[in-house]
Structures are given as structure tokens and as C-alpha cells.
Image (cartoon, grey):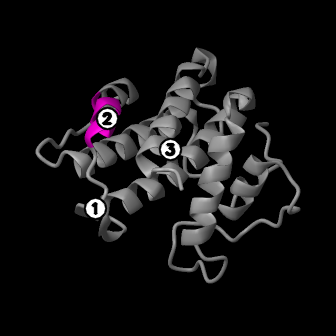
Amino acid sequence: MTDNTTVLAQAIDQTNSLVRAVPDDNKHAATPCTDFNVAQLVEHLAVIADRVGTAIAPESTPTGSTWDDAFTRLRPLLGGVDPDRVVDLPFGRLPLGAALGVFVGEFVTHGWDLAVAIGRTDLLDDGLGQHALALVTARIPRDPRTHTPFGEVVSVPADAPVYDRLAGWMGRDPVWRSE
């Protein structure tokens, strides 16, 4: 089994590539994550990165970071993670290694949101998508979802591309396209 720290580093690097690929004239475009446009999604990704950084290194708690600030702070922290240390996060108390797996799912799913919104699905790594899909399907139930931040599962054929299956599991329409 692959270490969640290694996979999270890959997810963060993929996210960084996607953020850097956002065209200036596309910042207010819609995304498949209906809560956010492109600029808001990038801000949300910075919040997630700060949350991960604080879980790893609780002595520093940044606020209001840009993606660049959050990425620059977080990426080096992934080299010294104690996966067995128990951390408190908004979604519960669990070993850091398990928490990092949750964040893999979040970064990879929102990475898909961003990639589709800016037309850069070529920047998505299928191996990373496969790992994220395995993590989220093991952690997030199909039913019920009434008390979760996830929409109902969108049915996708079992042989569909991995990111379509991930998007569907996370309650997104895999064939979503910006207007």
C-alpha cells in the first residue's frame, strides 16, 4: 500500500500545476463544484493546504494564505510526517496518516473541478485519480449522505475513466462542461 504522505505530495503538486494553468480571463468561470467559481476554488484549496499544514505542524497556524503561500509552506512539511500521531480536524480525530488520505481525496477531486473548468484535464494523472477513488469509496458511504458535504452519487459505468468515476462518487456530474 502506498503511503498517504507520498500520494498527498503528488496531489498537491498536481493541484499546483492546475492553479498555475488558470488563465487570467477564466478566474470567475463556473466549476463543477457548485459552491465555487475558479477563483473561489483556488482560495478554498489554499484553506485546505493551510489546514493540512497545521495538522502536520500545529505550532504555526496561518490565516488568509494565497495558494502560493500555502503551497510553499506545506510542500516541505510532507517530508517529516508522523503518520501515527493523532490529530484533531474539523471532520474528526484520527491518525495523521489517515487524515492525509482524506486530504488526498479532497485535493484530487477539487483538482478535477479546476481542470474541467479551465479545460486542462490533460494535467490530471490517472494513477493519482485511481488512488483517490480507492480512498474516497472506502471512506465516504454511497448512502445516506444527508449529513455529509457530498451530493448523491452520480451513476457512472464501472469502465468509465477514473476521473469520471471519482467525480460521480463525489456527487459531481462527470460530463459537466462550462457554459
Answer with left or right where residue 59 lies relative to residue 128.
left
Q: Measuring from the top left, give residue 135's x and y in whole percent.
A: 57, 61
Q: CA distance from mark 1 to mark 2?
A: 19 Å
The residue identified by callout 3 is: 7
Residue identifier under label 1:
84
In terms of secondary structure, where does tag 2 sit?
Answer: helix
Mark 2 lies on residue: 74
Eye-nearest disc, 2 or 3: 3
Q: Amino acid at mark 3?
A: Val
| Magenta span main SS | helix
Residue at position x 62%, y 43% in the image: 128
**Image location (x, y in percent) of residue 102:** 46, 58
Please indicate, yes or no, whether residue 31 appears anywhere in the rendered image.
no
Q: Nearer the viewer, residue 165 or 33?
A: 165
The reply to whether residue 138 is visible in this rendering is: yes
Q: Residue furthest left?
A: 59
- On the image, which quarter does residue 89 sit in? bottom left
Residue at image point 46% right, 56% down: 101
> Looking at the image, which residue sits at the far front?
1
- SS category of the residue bearing label 3: helix
- Looking at the rendering, the stretch of residues picked out in magenta corresponds to 73-80
Q: Position of residue 165 (x, y in %)?
A: 76, 56
Residue nearest the viewer, comparing 15 with 30: 15
Callout 1 touching callout 2 (CB < 8 Å): no
In the rendered view of the protein, which quadrant contains the C terminus? top right
